[in-house]
Amino acid sequence: MNSTHPLFSFCYFVAIIALTMCALQPLIGAVSLASALIYLLVLKGPRPALRMLAMALAVILIVVCFQMLTSHLGNTVLFCIGSSRYTLEALLAGLSMAEMLTAVIIWFSCYQEAVGADRFLSLFSRFLPTTSMMVSMVFNYVPGMMRRARQVSDAYKAIAPSLVDDTAADRGTAINRRSSRGILERLRWPVRLSSVLMGWSMETGLIAAASMRARGYGTQRRTSYLLLSWTFRDGVLSAVVAVLVAAAIVCEVQLMDGFGFYPEIGSFGGFWQYLPGAALMCFPVIYEGGVRLRWRLSKF
Amino acid sequence: MAAVEILDFSFSYPVQTAGSGFQALSQVRMRVESGSFMLLAGMTGSGKSTLMRCLKAELAPMGERSGSIRVFGQELVFDMAVSSRQAADIGYVLQDPEAQIVMDSVWHELAFGLENIGASQHEMQRRIAETASFFGINNWFDRKTADLSGGQKQLLNLASIMVMQPRLLLLDEPTAQLDPLATKEFLTALHRVSQELGVTVMIIEHNLEEVAPLVDEVAFIANRSVAFQGSFQGFIDYCSRCQTEYLPALPAATQLAHLVCPDSRPLPLTVRDGREWLFRRLKERSNLHTEVPADKSPTLGPIPGLSAASASDTEPLLKIHRAWFAYERTVAPVLRDLSLQLKPGGIYGIIGTNGSGKSTLLSLLAGIRKPQRGNVKRLRGLISAALPQDPKALFNQPTLRQELADNGNGGQHSDDRLAYWLERYKLTDMQERHPYDLSGGEQQKAALIKLLLRQPQLLLLDEPTKGLDAFTKADLLGVLRGLAAEGKSIVIVSHDLEFVASVADDCSMLFNGTLVGSGDAREFFAGNLFYTTAIYRITRGLLEGCVRLQDVYPHVS
């Protein structure tokens, strides 16, 4: 997905996330969650994937417990505590919700890694050159601003530590001192920091403006430089994905039509109805695997 | 063919700005040949920056203009809606490497100018490819601009001007914010632009040590007009006759030669030529007078007031014991097993290349950061104050006076103490100005006053000479020596070897996370071969123990 055209990658992720969000059903959710995790593993390696898995399990546990405690609908009683019934239906509803939630989160982080903001924005540079330029400027501005903020806070820590750090002022003094520090006094540092930063940023802004004008900004309509172009391969991939998406939508509509949680779990449908969706969601992993395999083979 | 022809050009600032309207340039006449590399020199505030900005119509200051400026035979158009042709033809590189960068990625920054002038995609790809290859940017072409080093940023600024294929390149102190290594790299690239592409270059630069060998022509701006124009040798002549206050800005070899034998011509510019010149001079002299050979001159004596005995019985102000520091657990530590004892009194210089951890060490001394292993012991009741690399990190008031009066804790410093420091550092006339309207050196001094009003025993200075010219450095040197004489302890971390050599009593080098070679500053610099002052590199083996220019006096008188 990171070697394809961003338009293709972007549309793919939109489709995947939409399909996941529209299907509140435990099996579709499980398929989506599993493929998202595998793709994350491929993209970022085992450590972040494991961390995500732990996060997903924790979310699932919490949401399932919450759902079972609050919803007592459904006919299949698993167990009773006192007069409360805890049902399989509530458990599965909670599971579906948690799966959907975590799958979407993980798909987004895959998107961040595979497409990212700048590749996404490069899509628009042709149609909205000024807007995409401004967004790029903001992306450049933020790290510089953060660095300046660190410099300011270091500079003040070295001459007036009590101003920067509340705890430094309170350290070694009576606890009631803390409560006596009024809101105004507490706000002094943020106010100071932002005022120093404001002045400094305006100064750098002037230089940036000079540098833009020096390079002919505003003399005529801007054109745009694109690193990416739509290739034949992107066309083929789009066609495959489009077919899969269409099939997945048809199957998902059918699946969801016969499905409901309450009062009893509906039909899960046939095994083949999950195939298009699964194929679609595993598509990047399969594609990536193919690329790697070909690379391996080409070395011999 | 003339690249630039200036005929009777005058310029005055309007009355509103800077308090009063004043004439910055009057009747300037100048001609710059196409393809030449010209240095625009002058004292601080002589109007050289104004002149350079007037050559770049898009950046020309507001004010009254008269006379004419022709660039490549075409009259300059001073219109806000300037043609893109003129914008591309005249390139302008500013001082601040970071603030000039507009886009978030390297490739987009390179494309920015071409996008502005409406180049086609095909044209852009080709030009960017060749420019990136010329400047060796291809290795970091896909990086984010925020992750680049200062040197890379300035190189990118030059490249993203060069991609527009200018015929005249204007640079206003492009290396002032760079470390020595990045300065050399930048000037090498600039020299290639001039030599290999024949682009006409005009540069304002304080770092004559590096620039002098590259220069074809010098124009000296004084009294609002061009006082001198000619070759660098002619310029040295002119300086020794009419502009002796500019001499400290000249390369070390030139200064040394001028000191030893002012009438000799030509004077050397580089260390190599300086050594050769000095060798010949000494040989002639020993032939004539059969003098004692130079290498038998007395060796270094101890520096008064800093004998080892007196230092050892006082308690150290600050003690770092086997400190380790890393910014992140997974990243290699910046400081490893570093120990340091700071005795009261005197100036202590810590030198090292960029990224050696100098600023980190300073932040440990200042108490901004704590080591993960080892400890920092401060003398009870020690007040220290640290001067940040960029004084702008401290300023937040509309006038200098309010800025300094504000003590950071909601209170005010007393007026008479404020007046004393303002007077002492000659800032009294500036006190109603905005701190940002001060020059670099004045900002530095203003920040220093802000620290001194807290009455610290220990002053910590991070790269205090960054962006300062030779005269301002000399001024700062006097300021620091004065404070040291009053009993303040000062620690300077810097990559400016010349400055540390002339100001510090003791010196260490920070390398690979620890301090090496700690000792008396003169002995330190006289013990190094590469990492030492230009004067020492010129005189090594010829005149004994000369680290600074003033060390040479006894040998010549």
Image (tube, helix red, strand yellow):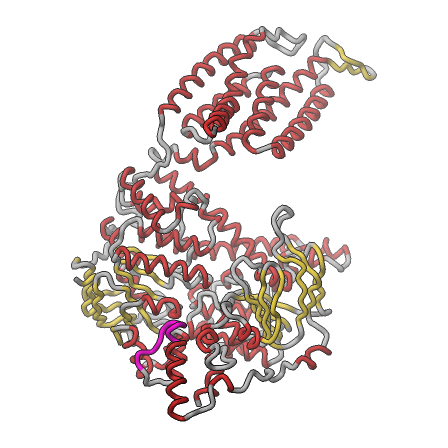
The N terminus of chain B, quarter of image: bottom left
Judge left or right: residue A161 versus residue B144: right
Residue B15 seen in the figure: no
Between residue A16 and residue B313, name the one nearer to us. Answer: B313
User: Residue B517's x, y, as percent?
Assistant: 60, 69
Quadrant of residue A46 in the image? Answer: top right
Judge left or right: residue B413 versus residue B41: right
Q: Is residue B266 magenta?
A: yes
Q: Residue at x 41, y 62 (%)?
A: B184
User: Residue B509's x, y, as percent?
Assistant: 58, 66
Question: Which is the main secondary structure of the residues drawn in magenta?
Answer: loop
Between residue A26 and residue B109, name the one nearer to us. Answer: B109
Residue B203 seen in the figure: yes
Q: Is residue A97 positioned above or below B188 on the image?
A: above
Judge left or right: residue A276 versus residue B340: left
Q: Is residue B492 magenta?
A: no
Q: Which residues are magenta?
A: B265-274
Q: Is residue B303 positioned above or below B319 on the image?
A: below
Quadrant of residue A169 in the image? Answer: bottom right
The C terminus of chain B, quarter of image: bottom left
How many discs appear?
0
Q: Residue at x 48, y 26 (%)?
A: A297
Q: Residue at x 39, y 88 (%)?
A: B285
Between residue B186 and residue B260, name the one nearer to us. Answer: B260
Pick out the residue farthest to the bottom.
Answer: B289
User: Residue B552's x, y, as percent?
Assistant: 46, 83
Q: Is residue B159 positioned above or below B488 on the image?
A: above
User: Residue A235's x, y, as percent?
Assistant: 37, 22
